[in-house]
Every structure is written in structure tokens, then in C-alpha cells.
């Protein structure tokens, strides 16, 4: 095993003809088996360096507590009046309405609604209705819809029955509509996001003939909003 070294060794006197000599020659290039230490010794590998320290993990910042505000206060519900009704071109399901939402002439919004199959045009025109004003503006059949008229939905027999929600006598256009026992918001968000409105809709139902939210009566200063006499309890309001 040592013959090649005997022939080529530049310093014959230093060669002791043992395997330990070869090990010492190869020592700088032998990779230690563990711990970053030299083979057969206790020092560091030349040029190896110490292990990099692990980066300290950043402490997780505590999340702010979830708001316990009821999503109902994010929905801007008002008494409105349908001042004009037209048909949406190329649709047999949609009405194109102009809805008065306040006392001023400029307080008019355009609403596209799927009530055409259920509510006669003459019944809708001039009617006071319950509206939500701050949903995301939508495009339906090429027309902009800036608000939504609420109605009850119920399956009677095998047919879907849809009726307008009635507002109390004496209610004025623009009157705010809230729920019993829920403090109204000082200001409403510009847009009631769909996740909040979906949470509200699941709790808007008819109970004892009245519109309710989570069992609380829905109404305005003039009184409670209510359903048509043919609408069964438990029907949803959408």
C-alpha cells in the first residue's frame, strides 16, 4: 500500500512506511463523520467554521379581538317608494325601476329586480317598499342596479310565492329601518359586504306576520314592517 509513496517521496528520511503517515497526509481533506470535528482529533475542520445559529423566530403578534358588532348594523335599510317601472329589454323576468330613497329629487336610485314574474307592474308602481341601499352596485342584463327591494319568499304547494314586504302606514320615504333592541349605526359603511349581508339574510324571517331579524321585530318610527297575510311564518325575506 505504501510502495507509491516510497518511490515518489521527496523526503525519504521522513517516510516511516506506516499507514499513519498516509492518514496524516490525507488528513486536511478527510471529511469528519460527525460534529464538524477532525477525524481522530478534537479541533475544527480547516476552513469549516462554526454552525450558523438558528434565526430567532419572530413572536406572533396577538390578533385584535373579533368585533362583537351585529352585522345587521352594516345594512342600510330604508323605506323607499317605487316611482317608475319599466321592462328590461330582452328579459321576461326583470323590471327596471326608479326608486325614491329620500325627500330630494336627486334621491333616486335605479333598481333591477326579478319581481316581474310575481308582482304586477301596477302593484309595484307608486308602492312604498323596504330597500337595502348599500349593497355592491351590480350589473344585471346590462343595466346598473344600485339597491335592492326586499320581498318574502315561500313555497306554497309546489309553487314559489314572492310578495313585497309591507311598510307601516305613516312611514315616510327615507325613514331608517332597524331591528328591535339593536342600536342603529351612527354611520353606515359605503358598502355592506356580501359576507355581512348573507349573515343578515339567514335571520330575516316572517314571525307572527311581522318582519323579524333573529326574532327581533324589524320596523321604523311608524311601526313594524309586515308580510302579506298569505305568507306563512318562517318564510325568508330576501
Image (tube, helix red, strand yellow):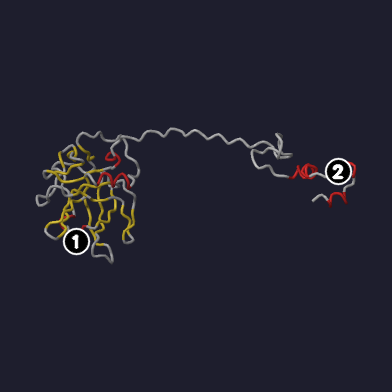
- Residue drawn at 32 percent across, 46 percent down: 195
Label placed on residue 117: 1
Q: Is residue 32 left or right of residue 220?
A: right
Q: Secondary structure at mark 1?
A: helix
Instruction: Using the image as rendered, state which of residue 224 and residue 58 is in the foreground.
Output: 58
- Residue drawn at 31 percent across, 46 percent down: 134
- Residue drawn at 27 percent across, 62 percent down: 88
Q: Position of residue 124 (x, y in %)?
A: 18, 55
Q: Position of residue 96 (x, y in %)?
A: 26, 58
Q: Is residue 28 left or right of residue 152?
A: right
Label placed on residue 10: none
- Residue drawn at 86 percent across, 43 percent down: 15
Q: Earlier in the sequence, mark 1 or mark 2?
A: 2
CA gap, disc 1 to disc 2? Answer: 107 Å
Instruction: Using the image as rendered, state which of residue 139 and residue 65 is in the foreground.
Output: 65
In the displayed structure, 12 sits above or below 186; it is below
Q: In the image as oriented, which residue stretches furthest toward the left?
A: 229
Q: In the image as oriented, which residue stretches furthest toward the bottom?
A: 90
Label placed on residue 15: 2
Answer whether labels 1 and 2 touch (C-beta < 8 Å).
no
Amino acid at each position: 500500500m505504501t510502495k507509491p509513496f516510497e518511490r515518489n517521496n521527496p523526503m525519504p528520511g521522513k517516510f516511516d512506511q506506516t499507514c499513519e503517515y498516509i492518514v496524516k497526509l490525507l488528513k486536511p481533506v478527510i471529511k469528519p463523520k460527525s460534529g464538524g470535528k477532525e477525524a481522530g482529533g478534537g479541533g475544527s475542520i480547516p476552513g469549516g467554521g462554526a454552525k450558523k445559529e438558528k434565526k430567532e423566530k419572530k413572536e406572533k403578534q396577538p390578533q385584535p379581538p373579533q368585533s362583537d358588532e351585529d352585522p345587521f348594523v352594516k345594512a342600510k335599510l330604508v323605506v323607499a317608494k317605487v316611482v317608475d317601472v319599466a321592462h328590461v329589454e330582452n328579459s321576461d323576468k326583470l323590471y327596471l325601476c326608479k326608486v325614491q330613497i329620500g325627500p330630494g329629487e336627486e334621491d333616486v336610485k335605479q333598481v333591477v329586480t326579478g319581481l316581474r314574474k310575481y308582482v304586477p307592474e301596477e302593484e309595484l308602481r307608486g308602492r312604498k317598499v323596504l330597500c337595502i341601499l348599500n349593497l355592491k352596485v351590480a350589473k344585471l342584463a346590462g343595466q346598473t342596479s344600485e339597491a335592492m327591494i326586499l320581498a318574502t319568499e315561500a313555497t306554497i304547494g309546489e309553487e314559489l310565492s314572492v310578495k313585497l314586504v309591507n311598510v307601516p302606514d305613516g312611514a315616510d320615504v327615507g325613514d331608517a329601518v332597524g331591528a328591535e333592541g339593536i342600536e342603529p349605526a351612527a354611520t353606515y359603511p359605503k358598502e355592506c359586504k356580501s359576507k355581512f349581508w348573507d349573515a343578515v339574510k339567514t335571520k330575516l324571517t316572517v314571525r307572527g306576520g311581522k318582519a323579524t331579524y333573529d326574532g327581533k321585530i324589524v320596523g321604523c318610527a311608524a311601526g313594524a314592517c309586515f308580510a302579506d297575510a298569505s305568507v306563512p311564518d318562517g318564510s325568508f325575506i330576501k
